[in-house]
Image (cartoon, rainbow, N blue to C red):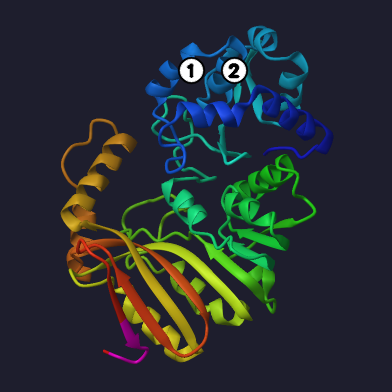
Amino acid sequence: MLVIDPSRIARVKGFLDELQYDVIHRALRPHYHVLPWPDFDDFAEAIECLPAPLRAAFDLLLLGKSFARKRAETLLDPLFIEDLLALNVLEEPTPAVIRTAGVSLLSFQGRYVFVSILPTYPTCRDTSIPVYLGPDSYTLAHNLPHGRPRDTVLDLGTGSGLQAILLAQASRKVVATDLHEDAVATARFNVALNGLQDTILVTAGDLYAPVEGERFDLIVSDAPYVPVPNSVPYPMYAAGGEDGMLVLGPLLDGVAAHLTPDGEAVLYAAGMGDQQRPFLTARLRALAERDNLTIDLVELFRIAIDNDLLNHTASLALAQPGETGTSPEWGALFERQGARVIYKVLIRIRHGAPLLRYIATGTGHLRATIEAADAE
């Protein structure tokens, strides 16, 4: 686990700022704002043009390559390497050789976050991804309501802590919860790395359990939502059960009780559906009626089931080299559920007249359907 030592962390951040780590990261990556991870080989080639210290920093901290300790100290700084070792960011798998302790340093809009190394990287040693950051994390980040300050914020399933860190600048208090102990420890480290210990509290627990009885002006979450057959092992950060509602369901059920009267929830999710709409609309319609909520369900993207099955096949091939064919468990699951489309959606929830508004974009043009909460 990463160690929180404020003085060492402050020196590490100062060194990264001096290197212009985020500025150069942004300049080298055309997809910086939408994809957290660069392609390993492409990025390794791109950084060849950089001065040796910058190249070493990216090789060591982002790509997760091993280095001779003396070489790293020569290219970077002995105190920087000493601090990273003391903080458990780096480890020595063999004498005189250093590498990261299974983490990778990403940056986003001037913030730094350590996360689990991407499983497709040859340097990855733990494919369970205990500390997740993916494209969906950035989708939520870009859709956070930055328009006005929020006094209190709740980030459910915080993972790396990125959403909490982004929202802390305009908030008095941010509470971030997660069930995975590695995620909690890493998020706390990332909070300290960005100098936000006085604003953000990271706490361990299942969804709302650590904040029972509290209400917040803003609730955000990128919760596990992937429909996963019961017979298939899947990383905790994404597994949503057979209907995708294992975590998202309780999260939605608790929103009304944890929002202030003028509060808002912003959630990113995905779910199965037919050609017309996500199955999630029925759940949200019932929720709006039960708890007097006004809900916007905004379709961001849709993918046909056949294409989603191809994605599962590709993921299976990466996780188990040599495997061929499709994913029969997922095919059977989609058939049982009657699913034809996977929808990626943004959900906005607030107190008000019971109403669900479904805004669809997957038909090639914007189409809004406003429904009474109890409509069929």
Quadrant for residue 39, please give it.
top left
Q: Which residue lies furthest to the right in this view?
A: 7
Q: Are marks 2 and 1 in contact (CB under 8 Å)?
A: yes
**Position of residue 338 in the picture relative to residue 131 (left or right):** left
The residue under label 2 is 54
Which amino acid type is marked by label 2? Answer: Leu
Q: Residues within 10 Å of mark 1 (few under 14, many from 20)?
A: some
Instruction: Please state, as top left, top right, bottom left or bottom right, where the N terminus lies in the image.
Output: top right
Residue at horizontal 32 percent and vertical 71 percent from the top? 359
Q: Is mark 1 on a helix, strand or loop?
A: helix
Locate residue 355, reporting x and y percent.
41, 86
Query: Is 45 in front, or is 306?
Result: 45
Name the side, left or right, on which 188 lies relative to 288.
right
What residue is pinned by disc 1?
Answer: 47
* Mark toward the start of the polypeptide (2 vs 1): 1
Is residue 361 shown left or right of residue 25? left
Tell me where the magenta segment starts and ends, as one range.
370-375
Characterize the local packing of mark 2: few (<14), some (14-19) or many (20 or more) Cα atoms within 10 angstroms. many
Is residue 364 shown to the viewer in this render? yes
Quarter in which the C terminus is drawn = bottom left
On screen, residue 36 above or below 136? above
